[in-house]
Image (tube, rainbow, N blue to C red):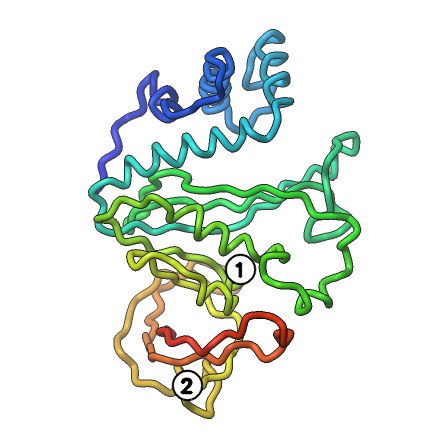
Amino acid sequence: MVVLAKPDDNWVEQEMKYLSLGEKRLEERVVKIIQDFSQNPTGSIPEFCGDWATTKATYEFCKNPVGARDQIVTAQKKATLNRMQGQPLVLILQDTTSFDFTDHPATEGLGPLENENCRGFFAHSSLAVTPDGVPLGLLAQQTWVRDDNEVGSRHHRHQRPIEAKESYKWLQGLDDSTAHLPPETQALVVSDRESDIFDYFVYPRASQVELLVRARHDRSLADESHPLFLAVSNSPVRGKIQVEVGRRPDQPARIAECQVQFKRVKLRPPKNRPAHWPKLEPIVLWAI
């Protein structure tokens, strides 16, 4: 169990005590920005700063090179790793957020989002939480802007190695978030259907790290004729669990009883990899 104390006035100093920007003034500015923003997280920069001098100083800080952002994330990771000390199991949640600045046409350095008519950037974050859902903090974050010249090139994705694809974010996030884990802590990295990537399953990781990926592809199996989904649905029911289902326009809130099935399977690697790429072998995992 984790008990979080009520935040005091110096919680930001504690969170940023590992921050190293090479200049004390800049480090103090970061602490002040976080303190101000935490008091009004939905406000604009002028709104959460409160006066013109503070607003101007914040805008000036935001012009700093990306190195400052990286150092802030690094400081946050160190603080998070400290909170993970003594935890037998931690969930690491990976996901991507798109930041849409389409309504700010004068903003420079943006690229297309999921809808190519929208402009913004992406951030892929890895958040550590306890099994009870208590957030422990950020462990990793990547940001990027899509290239306008690559819009419409999705059909060429099978011809590019994983390192050259946007989907490499899952592998990079796994690397960044699980480096320097406390030795006594087991980590379960959780991600959605977009991370159902064979390269992600076989990517090297420490023995204390496991993956939980929501399946997207009905993959072929190396040891039986049925594909993945059918093979699991044909396996014995191992238990039942009750799940709260929220209210919908056509249905009241209810308790649903779900059957749980799982099976040890051996996945075949994708067939459409170019011959000059490293060969992938089948991998054994558990499907639930």
Which residue, as the protein is rendered here, is positioned at the far front?
A: 276
Rendered residue at 74%/39% (across/down):
102
Is 17 or 134 nearer to us in this picture?
Answer: 17
Rendered residue at 78%/48% (across/down):
148
Q: Please provide percent x and percent y for residue 24.
A: 46, 12
Which residue, as the protein is rendered here, is positioned at the far bottom?
A: 225
Q: Pick the quarter of the image with the C terminus.
A: bottom left
Q: In the image, is 101 to the left or to the right of 233?
A: right
Q: Please provide percent x and percent y for residue 143.
A: 58, 41
* Category of crowding for the residue at label 2, using alpha-carbon neighbours closer than 10 angstroms: few (below 14), some (14–19), many (at least 20): some
Which residue has dot 2 on it? 231
Mark 2, mark 1: which one is toward the viewer? Answer: 2
Disc ID at residue 249: 1
Residue 87 versus residue 157 in the image, above or below: above
Q: Amino acid at mark 2?
A: Ala
Is 242 or 169 nearer to us in this picture?
Answer: 169
Instruction: Quote the CA–CA distance across marks 2 and 1.
Output: 34 Å
What is the total number of numbered labels drawn onto the structure image?
2
Q: In the image, is 74 to the left or to the right of 50?
A: left
Q: Please provide percent x and percent y for residue 234.
A: 38, 87
Residue 269 versus residue 91 in the image, above or below: below
Q: Quadrant of residue 1?
A: top left
Rendered residue at 35%/74% (across/down):
286
Q: Amino acid at mark 1?
A: Pro
Q: Please provide percent x and percent y for residue 47.
A: 58, 18
Rendered residue at 49%/11% (across/down):
25
